Image: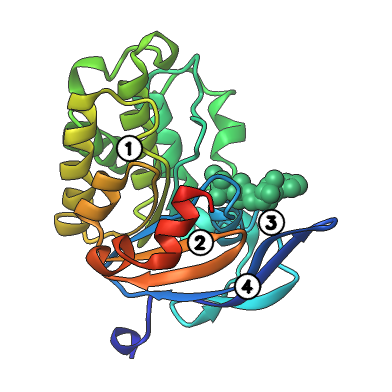
Amino acid sequence: DRGDKPLLHIEGVTVRFGGIVALDGVSFDVARGQICGLIGPNGAGKSTLFNCLSRLYTFSSGRIEFEGQPLASLPRHKMAGLGIGRTFQNLALFRTMTVLENVLIGCHSKHHAGFLRNAFRLPGVARVEADALARAHELIAFLELGPVADRTVADLPFGTQKRVELARALASEPQLLLLDEPACGLNHEELESLGTLILDIRNRRKVTVLLVEHHMSLVMGVSDKVVALNFGKKIAEGTPAEVRRHPEVIRAYLGE
Ligand code: ADP
Ligand code: MG
């Protein structure tokens, strides 16, 4: 029964780059429907873990299971379609395309591996199926991008581009959404609405969220549980209140 297994099970994952141990035997679970924060100083291994989850990196030992299935057994090019979506620490959008086109690409990554190739042969979005278009418009409305749907991404403010990236990541209807520093570069007002948005993504769209974030009040405010890494090792795991006052976490952030 899928209900009694964690959506994501990470067990003893180790990643080496030459002499550097980027992740060192990291284990934790993310339950379905949870918002799990992942914190740690720069170089702690947070992005490396995301890159393992989206299978951009291979781990030298350990095990990751998604819905009880070893990640290694799932075809890499199908990750989005299989239910793991992500945003990147640096934006990964098609900057010369419109908001709508970017979201449509996300819609198609679930169903058509060849969409990207075909997209550039087709005149505009004329031949995009109606259901993908409806889904894209629904997401654009959810992220309050309606007024800029036909604008070129490169012309939009940074905070708006970040919402486009969220729409694109949600377009493949992931079960698990990986957010890598979504607050980075946002102004105060955008930060406040990001917190609400992350909660809405879980509450209204039923998406499980793994959130890498440096902005402590954001990550502590929205997460059900928090995992802290330092130098590739898990140093704490618990509720936001438990992790916030954990001596090793305090030490890591004070740089002792
Ligand atoms: P974080 O996202 O927590 O800041 P990273 O996962 O980016 O940390 O990096 C963890 C460690 O792994 C760092 O020492 C980093 O330099 C190293 N690292 C990450 N990716 C690579 C890579 N592709 N090649 C070599 N070293 C890497
Ligand atoms: Mg990082």
Q: Pinpoint residue 79: horizontal percent, then vertical percent.
A: 54, 58
Disc number lying in front (3 or 4): 4
Residue under the image location 39 percent in, 46 percent down: 213
Q: Pinpoint residue 44: horizontal percent, then vertical percent.
A: 57, 54
The tag on residue 62 is none
| Outermost top residue | 155
Label 3 to label 2: alpha-carbon separation: 18 Å
Find numbered disc 1 in the image and state the secondary structure of the residue it sits on: helix
CB atoms of marks 3 and 4 within 8 Å:
no
| CB at disc 3 and ligand 1 closer than 8 Å | yes
Residue under the image location 15 percent in, 58 percent down: 203
Tag 2 or tag 1, which sits nearer the N-term?
1
Tag 3 or tag 1, which sits nearer the N-term?
3
Label 1 to label 2: alpha-carbon separation: 28 Å
The residue to which callout 1 is attached is 167
Tag 2 or tag 4, which sits nearer the N-term?
4
Tag 1 or tag 4, which sits nearer the N-term?
4
The residue to which callout 2 is attached is 229
Find numbered disc 2 in the image and state the secondary structure of the residue it sits on: strand
Tag 2 or tag 3, which sits nearer the N-term?
3
Find numbered disc 4 in the image and state the secondary structure of the residue it sits on: strand
Q: What's the residue type where badge 1 is placed?
A: Ala
Disc number lying in front (4 or 2): 2
Label 4 to label 2: alpha-carbon separation: 13 Å
Residue 50 shown left or right of residue 132 in the figure:
right
| CB at disc 2 and ligand 1 closer than 8 Å | yes
